[in-house]
Image: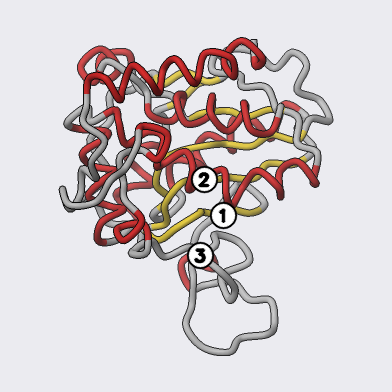
Amino acid sequence: MISTLKSLKPWLDAGLSFVYPEVCQICGAERASASEGFVGPLCWEKVRFIQPPFCARCGLPYEGDITTTFECHNCKEMELHFRTARSAVTAEGMVLDIVHRYKYQRHMWFEAFLADLLIRQAAKILTQEQWDMIIPVPLHPAKQHEREFNQAERLAARLSLATGIPVNKKLLQRVEPTRTQTQLSRNERMANVGKAFSLRSTQGLNGKKLVILDDVFTTGATTSACAKLLKPAGVADICVWTVARGL
């Protein structure tokens, strides 16, 4: 499957280039190809990759010279069910605009750009740590029908292609059509997703190391709700990766 996708990529890029002009879809002034997600070099410079220091639990970046391991205030007050979470970039400015255009306006040409951000930061780490499975956060069927795609599933497929770690998109299902988390407080987010998910099967999970994948991490309520279902199945370790980290 992976080799097939790799062989099709040049054809897919060529198809996108035929439909869309090779110009940056952010500034409209630079040349940018389909393989670059139609984001030009100067706009690329606006991306802020997350580097240390950051919270050891949720990956929230901090300014300054912090050399000791620490957990942020949010993590100390929440019961998080994953061991650690990391994000590739901060969810602000241009990146946040691209995420919203991709998810809510179906600007699918930005997928390559978002996947590239994730792969640059996550692929080497995940490969070295030998994770067994990528679990994309599921959408409720009604929401997925409305949006016509699940961004977490699509990004997980691209990360899988880069790492060789298989994706399991059938393990979790979303059973409650929750409100969007965007405008909710931390406690409201936790309550909103507390019973939103269910586990289809526990078979084959004992001793496995799982990566929960989503597009944006804010408080960790959604990914923690997923991890809470997986832990009792004998899972050895759970981490979270997202493209962007809300500040």
Q: Identify the element where label 3 is drawn.
A: loop
Location of the C terminus by quadrant is bottom left
Sequence-wise first label, 3 or 1: 3
Relative horizontal placement of residue 191, taking residue 22 as reference (left or right): right
Q: Residues within 10 Å of mark 3 (few under 14, many from 20)?
A: some
Q: Identify the element where label 2 is drawn.
A: helix
Residue 107 location, quadrant: top left
Residue 50, label in figure: 3
Q: Nearer the viewer, residue 140 or 185?
A: 140
Residue 104 location, quadrant: top left
Give how far apart the Cα atoms at labels 3 and 2 are. 11 Å
Q: Nearer the viewer, residue 244 or 190?
A: 244
Q: Residue at x 66, y 14 (%)?
A: 3
Whether 172 is drawn above or below 37: the answer is above
Whether 152 is drawn above or below 190: the answer is above
Of labels 3 and 1, the one closer to you: 3
Q: Are marks 3 and 1 in contact (CB under 8 Å)?
A: yes
Whether 136 is drawn above or below 245: the answer is above
Residue 14, label in figure: none
Sequence-wise first label, 3 or 2: 3
Q: Residue at x 39, y 54 (%)?
A: 218
Colouring used for the render? secondary structure
Under mark 2, the amino acid is Leu
Residue 86, label in figure: 1
* Residue identifier under label 2: 118
Give how far apart the Cα atoms at labels 1 and 2 are. 10 Å
Relative horizontal placement of residue 39, taking residue 100 as reference (left or right): right
Residue 40 placed where, x, y %?
31, 50
**The furthest residue to the right:** 207
Q: Residue at x 39, y 28 (%)?
A: 196
